[in-house]
């Protein structure tokens, strides 16, 4: 099963590349909605790799997931495969 994961890191100028935020989305419908919102594709069509989220996308994702993202981070979204 594929799902999306959102990760957050400090910007490059902080010179700290450690993971600061991680959110795994396991709900199928939510994954499909996020795939459409971020890449205008079905989850199954998203290529491996990470996509940096824009500020507008972060706000839309936060509203969709009903969460608050910590400020000051750069966020990425990418597909994962359940083992």
Image (cartoon, grey):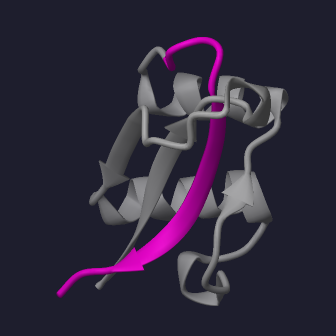
Q: Position of residue 28 (x, y in %)?
A: 34, 66
Horizontal relation, residue 80 to residue 41: left or right: left
Q: Residue at x 36, y 43 (%)?
A: 23
**Pick the front one: 42 or 6:** 6
Q: Is residue 49 magenta?
A: no
Q: Residue at x 56, y 23 (%)?
A: 63
**Pick the front one: 17 or 74:** 17
Quarter of the picture holding the N terminus: bottom left
Quarter of the picture holding the C terminus: bottom left
Q: Residue at x 55, y 25 (%)?
A: 62
Q: Is residue 45 above or below residue 49?
A: below
Horizontal relation, residue 32 to residue 10: left or right: left
Q: Specify the segment rendered in magenta.
A: 69-83
The quadrant where residue 57 appears: top right
Q: Is residue 42 above or below residue 66?
A: below
Q: Position of residue 55 (x, y in %)?
A: 80, 27
How many callouts does the rendering have?
A: 0
The quadrant where residue 14 appears: top right
Q: Residue furthest left?
A: 83
Horizontal relation, residue 64 to residue 58: left or right: left
Q: Is residue 74 above or below residue 76?
A: above
Q: Residue furthest front?
A: 15
Q: Is residue 76 magenta?
A: yes
Q: Is residue 59 above or below residue 29?
A: above
Q: Residue at x 53, y 32 (%)?
A: 64
**Pick the front one: 17 or 21:** 17
Q: Position of residue 78 (x, y in %)?
A: 56, 66
């Amino acid at each position: 099963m594929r799902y999306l994961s959102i990760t957050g890191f400090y910007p490059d100028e902080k010179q700290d590349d450690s993971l600061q935020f991680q959110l795994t989305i396991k709900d199928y419908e939510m994954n499909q909605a996020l795939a459409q919102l971020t890449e205008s594709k079905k989850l199954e069509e998203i290529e491996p790799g990470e996509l940096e989220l824009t500020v507008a996308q972060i706000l839309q994702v936060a509203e969709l997931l009903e969460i608050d993202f910590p400020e000051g981070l750069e966020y990425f979204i990418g597909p994962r495969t359940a083992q």
